[in-house]
Image: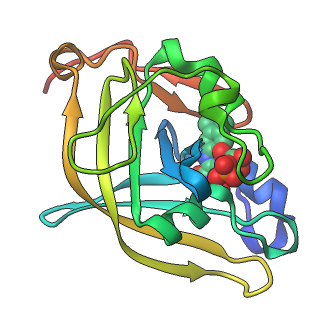
């Protein structure tokens, strides 16, 4: 057995340890609209529901070098609307690919030819064929941590849920994030 004092670890070791212990984490594959209506898509696993009444979720988004906002944060602050897509295994490669930064204004949806379809309550579309999509508006934004390298915390109010009935009945195949570069899928379900 080994113990770890988080405050004696360097930033990357601390990150690797935490993401290896809090598992599996759900993946928010977040679609936003930016300048000139371009569509941005990026995955975030520091994500979960906060409450169901009111229906709120959070995303925890880091900054780029020189304190620059990630495109997802920038678009949500500008347009207020976003869609959290919950991916299954068939989307795993695209989830990974859209986790790499593109210059602001370049669309992952266009670059990787990701099919989309209209949402019900927001102007931002969802990924076509996705198991679940949560249509959100920005409820609150605040930062946590060091002013020179803060985390942007986005709290979204969920207005509408799109759900594929098959995945509601049987969520096998939904993707999750583990430590390092590892992913997992739901493959065993039991009731107590
Ligand atoms: C599975 C997965 C989960 C990720 N989770 C997070 C996260 O919780 N917070 C974060 O800031 N970045 C996370 N990233 C990295 C972002 O997806 C990455 O920085 C991306 O380029 C952000 O895109 P954007 O600038 O278009 O918003 C994750 C990447 C992957 C592949």
Q: Position of residue 29 (x, y in %)?
A: 50, 39
At a point 50% along the width and 12% down the height, the residue shown is 90
In front of the other: 84 or 106: 106
Relative placement, left or right, of 10 versus 179 is: right
Q: How many marks?
A: 0
User: Where 128 sits versus 52, above or below?
Assistant: above
Q: Which residue is drawn at 73% across and 30% down?
A: 181
Height in image: 126 above or below 123?
Answer: above
- Depicted 104 relative to depicted 190: above or below: below
Residue 18 visible somewhere in the drawing: no
Observer-nearest residue: 141 or 168?
A: 141
Residue 161 in the image: x percent, y percent?
20, 41
Residue 133 place in picture, x, y as percent: 32, 37
Q: Is residue 103 above or below residue 43?
A: below
Query: What residue is rendered at 51% in x and 39% in y?
Result: 23
Residue 139 seen in the current view: yes
Front residue of 171 and 125: 125
């Amino acid at each position: 057995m080994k113990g770890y004092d988080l405050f004696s670890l360097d930033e990357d070791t601390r990150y690797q340890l935490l993401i290896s212990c809090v598992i599996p984490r759900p993946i928010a594959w977040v679609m936003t609209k930016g300048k000139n209506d371009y569509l941005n898509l990026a995955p975030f696993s520091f994500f979960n529901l906060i409450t169901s009444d009111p229906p709120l979720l959070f995303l925890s988004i880091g900054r780029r070098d020189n304190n620059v906002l990630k495109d997802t944060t920038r678009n949500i602050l500008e347009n207020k609307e976003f869609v959290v897509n919950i991916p299954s295994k068939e989307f795993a490669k695209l989830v990974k690919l859209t986790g790499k930064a593109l210059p602001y204004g370049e669309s992952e949806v266009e670059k990787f030819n990701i099919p989309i379809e209209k949402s019900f309550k927001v102007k931002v579309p969802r990924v076509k064929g996705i198991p679940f999509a949560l249509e959100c508006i920005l409820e609150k934004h605040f930062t946590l941590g060091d002013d020179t390298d803060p985390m942007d915390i986005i709290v979204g109010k969920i207005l509408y849920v799109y759900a594929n009935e098959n995945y509601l009945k049987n969520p096998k195949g939904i993707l999750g994030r583990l430590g390092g570069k590892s992913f997992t899928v739901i493959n065993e379900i039991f009731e107590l």
